[in-house]
Amino acid sequence: MRCFAVFGDPIAHSISPRLHNLAIKKLGIEGFYGRVHLCECGVDALKNRFNALGLNGANITIPHKQTTAKIADKLDIFASATGAVNTLVRRGGGLLGFNTDAPGFMMAISDFKDIQNALIIGAGGTAKALAAALSMSGVSISVLNRSDKSSEFANCEFLSFDSAISVATSFDLVINTTPAGLINSDLPAPQNIMQKFLGGARYAFDAVYGIKTPFLAMADECGLKYKDGKEMLLNQAAIAFCHFFYDYDFRVENIAELMRPALSYD
Ligand code: NDP
């Protein structure tokens, strides 16, 4: 039997076990996917627990994604670009590290057409993954954050709340990667800035899933086509599943459909 788990702190809220176990069950594969609450940070803590459990692979969430990039023997293109791994696979005597958030996001917005430029609000791990994925597709990126993280986005225009209001550019796509709207009822940036950018955009995307955030409510009022983070969550899991079962010839789209009912369980 192959065993997998999701590592994080906190981890009780993660729906990864039910997404993966549903696909395992429907495909009739011998496998199990659990969860590991790992409070200790650091390379040794993560590697020791992964090895002690004899896992074939794992998904990694906050706050261990950067640490995991250090224990992988080889990184895929998105993990290299972001320095963050959310999928670890034991293969050929080594550990392979993948970032499936980035391609999962690109799949989620595949029906957003002709995106030339995008504004990413927030400057954390998700912002980096999305900036890397969009840049690789030739999209020009600007980043807006409440605090200065310009040194972490060397190839992007970096906007502060003070500078943003006088920027003349409009953006095809505006993305919220902050937890604003999940942890409170705030917009991710002051109202006048949000109105300006959403008013000039065609599409909006929020990495938060399961609720209509104030950001998405404003996008709706502005007449934009918009999505929350549910498809991204589903796609990153389906891509990870295909990495876990690399010796099967699974298609990501098919695995996503097998997992989809698990998104709406109570
Ligand atoms: P990080 O903690 O790495 O980054 C969060 C960013 O948001 C930081 O730049 C922070 O600013 C900013 N921020 C935090 N709170 C606020 C606020 N109240 N108002 C304005 N800005 C704020 O988080 P992640 O990038 O890992 O995750 C961000 C979100 O994306 C989470 O809500 C998470 O659930 C979601 N997510 C969704 C996924 C999916 O599959 N749909 C996958 C991964 C994440 P500062 O730099 O100043 O601290």
Image (spheres, rainbow, N blue to C red):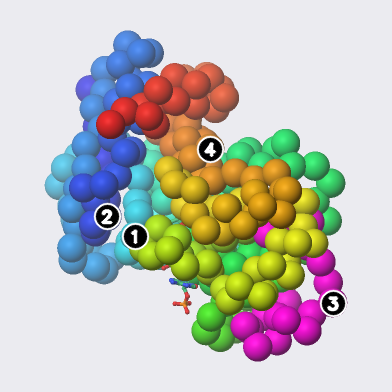
Judged by depth in the image, the label closer to the viewer, 4 or 3, is 3
Inspect the magenta stretch and tell me whether residue 149 lies in it: no
Nearer to us in this view, 231 or 246 = 231
Image location of residue 150, percent across then percent down? 61, 82
Q: Which quadrant would residue 1 be assigned to in this image?
A: top left
- Residue at the spot of label 1: 62
| Alpha-carbon span between mark 2 and mark 3 | 41 Å
- Is the residue marked by circle 4 packed among few (<14), some (14-19), or many (20+) residues within 10 Å? many
- Residue at the spot of label 4: 231
Element class at badge 1: loop
Ligand 1 lies under 8 Å from the Cβ of mark 4:
no
Q: Name the amino acid, label 3.
A: Ala
Q: Which mark is residue 168?
A: 3
Answer with left or right where residue 149 lies relative to residue 109. Answer: left
Asked if the residue under mark 3 is in contact with the one under mark 4, i.e. CB atoms within 8 Å, the reply is no
Nearer to us in this view, 178 or 186 = 186
- Sequence-wise first label, 4 or 3: 3
Q: Which mark is residue 40?
A: none
Asked if the residue under mark 1 is in contact with the one under mark 2, i.e. CB atoms within 8 Å, the reply is yes
Ligand 1 lies under 8 Å from the Cβ of mark 1:
yes
- Sequence-wise first label, 2 or 4: 2
